[in-house]
Amino acid sequence: MGVIPPWSDLPPELLSAIAEFLITNPIDILSFRSVCKSWCSSSSFSSPTLSPPLPLTTPSPPYPLRQSSYCLNPDFSVLSVTVIYALRPPIDEDFPSWMPRVWVLFLDQSVPGKVSIRQPFSKNSYSLPINFPRTLNFLDFHASELGRFYNFSYLSKKGCNLIQDSFRVVHKVVLFSNCNGLVVAVVLSEEGKLGLFRLGSGVKVEDVGVPTQWEIIHDGKGFRFDDIVEFKGRVLGIDRRGRVYDIVIGKGSSTKLNVVVPPIAGGGGRRKRVVESLGRLHLVVRCTVRGENDGLFKVYELNEGTKKWIEVKSIGDQTFFFGTEFSFSAAAELLHGSYGKNCILFKQNSFVNYSSGYDDNSEMFRKSESSKLRIGVRHLEDGSHLSLIGSHPGYSNLFWPPPSWIWTKDKSERLGNLLTALDKLQSRIPGGDKAKFNELALVDQVGALKLMREALKFMKETFKLKELLYGFKRLQQQKKSINLHDQEGTSTLATEERPASADSDCDWFSVETNFNACILQFEENTSNLEDAINKKKYCAPAE
């Protein structure tokens, strides 16, 4: 038997061909380049790109796709991508059993060469506060892509600057390449209208050219669309009755809508959503139940043989996720075990009421402790009532706050950095120097006093949190000591003397979560204070 040559000896032309297939996934290309020198040299290095050729400057959506009451005349539009990853720490890391092992991360790229974190289920990017890692090397983690979705933002000139914002009227974007190599973007508007523009022809998505002008597929007259999806090489549209249309995109301006699935019985009165799971298409409907204010979720699966929606009572070990402009499905094993089964998670306004245009549970979402996690949870197996994600720590910790293993600094070091930063910020505010303070105008004196009060308040709270953290670490050490003595059969503490938290993993999980949330909130507050100080001319400049 001959000797098998090493992988590093593969021909350069074969390696280059393999690298070409990986170009649309940054994790795959990074992993490929990290194998050895020959593999690295076979693929060209470029700045971080989540999905070539995006971001891409495009024509702005035409007036028919916008609300009549929404006045917007952008100078430019940008088509970009958001990729959703499940990040896990390295296997050999020694973490307590109660520590979250998965972080669901939304990465956004609307500016070439710049990748930013997006707030979970939100259209807003996250401004990184003090201490937050400025770089994340995905090769240091186990990363799995859960899904991706596309966004429209607009750039308007304001003086010499470009101001970026999201098109609030765009519900969803599907990027599609047909068998002829024609790449198109199909857009669903908030009013249920459909439009598209052609990005060009080419076998590969990264070879697309300059976008053409917009084409209106459906103007909203007669019926309205609720969702669109690419499914098995076709773009499908779903209207308010659950009827499915095959959007046949031809050359030139020839686009047809063919009904391929009849409507369901009953409508539910709210926006209907579709999601692909395990190669099957599902329709999710929120129905109003008399006497209940949270409504009932019904899930249908498309029978491709009969071309009909069939109601199902369970989605197995899957969890369906819905934002206003995306949907995806993930298995429990990809998230965190048994907790992620047969469940629906959805962002506020993902299933808006047709009549009001708002979520029927707006009051419930306003009670959320975190504005970043206005997400509802509905378990299908037990028919439980709708609840906020905050009451399900196993789910909420998937998204926010990020787990401890993301940071390169431990909690004590982060709090120490906070105190140092607050001390420097305080020294920039004219308050300690009486002469300089008296020179200020009255309105500036009031502003300086407010800033000083904020800085002192944050310092006091940070000192208090640091003391609590010290006590928490003492309890952790005590638990380790108890467990060690129990294993040896010579516990030094009687059972009744042990702290209750020492025997409860759930307690440690909650405490860890609260510490992470508090420290991150303090870091955000400090960064906001720094921004406020930087804007005041009467404050000293940063050193």
Image (tube, rainbow, N blue to C red):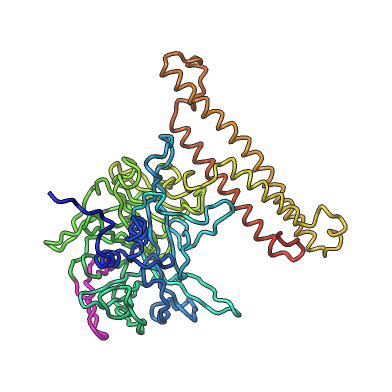
Judge from the rendering whether residue 270 lies leftward or rightward of residue 491; answer left or right.
left
Residue 198 occupies quadrant: bottom left
Does the magenta-highlighted stretch encompass residue 279?
Answer: no
Judge from the rendering whether residue 90 lies leftward or rightward of residue 247; answer left or right.
right
Asked whether residue 327 is in view, the answer is no
Does the magenta-highlighted stretch encompass residue 244?
Answer: yes
Q: Say how many tags the image has.
A: 0
Q: Where is residue 443 in the image (x, y as percent from the top left)?
A: 79, 63
Judge from the rendering whether residue 497 lies leftward or rightward of residue 351; answer left or right.
right
Q: Nearest the camera: 282 or 23? A: 23
Q: Which residue is drawn at 40% across and 73% down?
A: 79
Residue 359 occupies quadrant: bottom left
Q: Position of residue 109 (x, y in %)?
A: 44, 66
Identify the main secondary structure in magenta. strand
Farthest front residue in view: 2
Q: Nearest the camera: 322 or 431? A: 431
Q: Which residue is drawn at 46% across and 63% down?
A: 115
Query: Is the residue 164 above or below the residue 335 in the image?
Result: below
Q: Position of residue 505 (x, y in %)?
A: 43, 31
| Quadrant where the C terminus is found in the figure | bottom right
Q: Nearest the camera: 437 or 412? A: 412
Q: Where is residue 18 in the image (x, y as percent from the top left)?
A: 26, 64
Query: Is the residue 161 above or below the residue 433 in the image?
Result: below
Farthest bottom residue in view: 252
Q: Nearest the camera: 309 or 81? A: 81
Q: Give the range drawn in magenta.
A: 236-259
Q: Which residue is drawn at 22% across and 71% down?
A: 245
